[in-house]
Amino acid sequence: MTLFHKLKGYLFAAIAAASYGTNPIFAIPLYGEGVDVTSVLFLRYATAVLMMGIPLWLHNRHQLRVTAGEGLRLFGMGLLMVLSSILLFEAYRYLSAGIASTLLFFYPVMVALIMAACYHEKLSARSWTCLFLAFTGVALLSLGDDGHIISLIGLTLVMLSSLSYAIYLVWINRGPIRHLAPSTVTLYVLMSGLLALTVLTAAQGGLTFPRSTTGWANALALGLFPTIISLYFTSQAIAAVGSTTTAIFGALEPLTAVLLGILVLSETLTLRPAVGMAVIFVSVTLLMMRKRAT
């Protein structure tokens, strides 16, 4: 692997993580306009499919050819992605953007555990220490300044979201569809998620829509930044430098969410969650660097 190829992979991973960290600043204002979580995600996926699918169909439609087996696997990946999205967006209703996004960053730990359990990757004593520190950071982040759990529902939702995303990352790197173009994978994942969301919104009585121009702008931004850009560059980064290195750069995701939460959503950050965030960032990053080195 050449230096240029590595640097390109690092850049793609950074773009993917930072763009995914913009989720809350576009989603939370839509809640304020009365748009429910499923409708927010439907608008996000629908705009993403249109913005990505039309150019791909017009200029590179040969990339859309997949076998029945590949299509079934892509559909399963789409279900994992939309499940992770639903759980995360529901968690925004109970947790601040910074805390929810930082807890989502626990997914590299889950990737490491999945790889150890399913692919027999060995974890060293240093790796286990990093895992312990990561769990300690989660514990710190889960407690408010009064020492009580901030929201058990929110914590459960975001940790399940993290697990779903970890399984997605392992599948895309280890599964039998690694030969497909990243744009093909991304579009089929989005289409599968949109199909699932269509069924969910129909079951819930239909869509709710934004009531303002700003609301529609937020919906379009959700389709572009944390969806198309993030998924596409995640696929590109994994193809270039692998899941582990891509996961290391995932630290930019919660950092982006924390910073934007403070600047855009007027959220506050007190000492205990700040310490918890720092512990998670450091332990997870060290864990992933250790895995890459071994």
Image: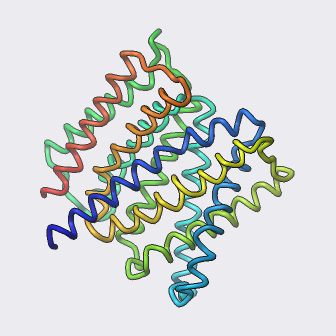
Q: Position of residue 106 (x, y in %)?
A: 38, 42
The image shows residue 188 at horizontal and vertical percentages of 57, 73
Find the residue positioned furthest to the front.
213
Say which quadrant the N terminus sits in: bottom left
Q: Residue furthest top?
A: 146
The x and y percentages for residue 25 are: 56, 38
In the rendered image, which quarter is residue 136 located in? top left
Looking at this view, is 55 or 1 the one in front?
A: 55
In the rendered view, tell whether residue 180 sits above or below residue 286: below
**Looking at the picture, does residue 45 appear above or below residue 205?**
below
Q: In the image, what residue occupies the spot 69% across and 44% down? A: 37
State whether residue 176 is above or below residue 86: below
Q: For this rendering, which residue is in front, 48 or 108? A: 48
Would you identify the image quadrant in which residue 189 lies?
Answer: bottom right
Say which residue appears at 23% left-offset and 50% top-offset: 288
* Quadrant housing the C terminus: bottom left
> Which residue is pictured at 48% across the width and 20% down the height?
268
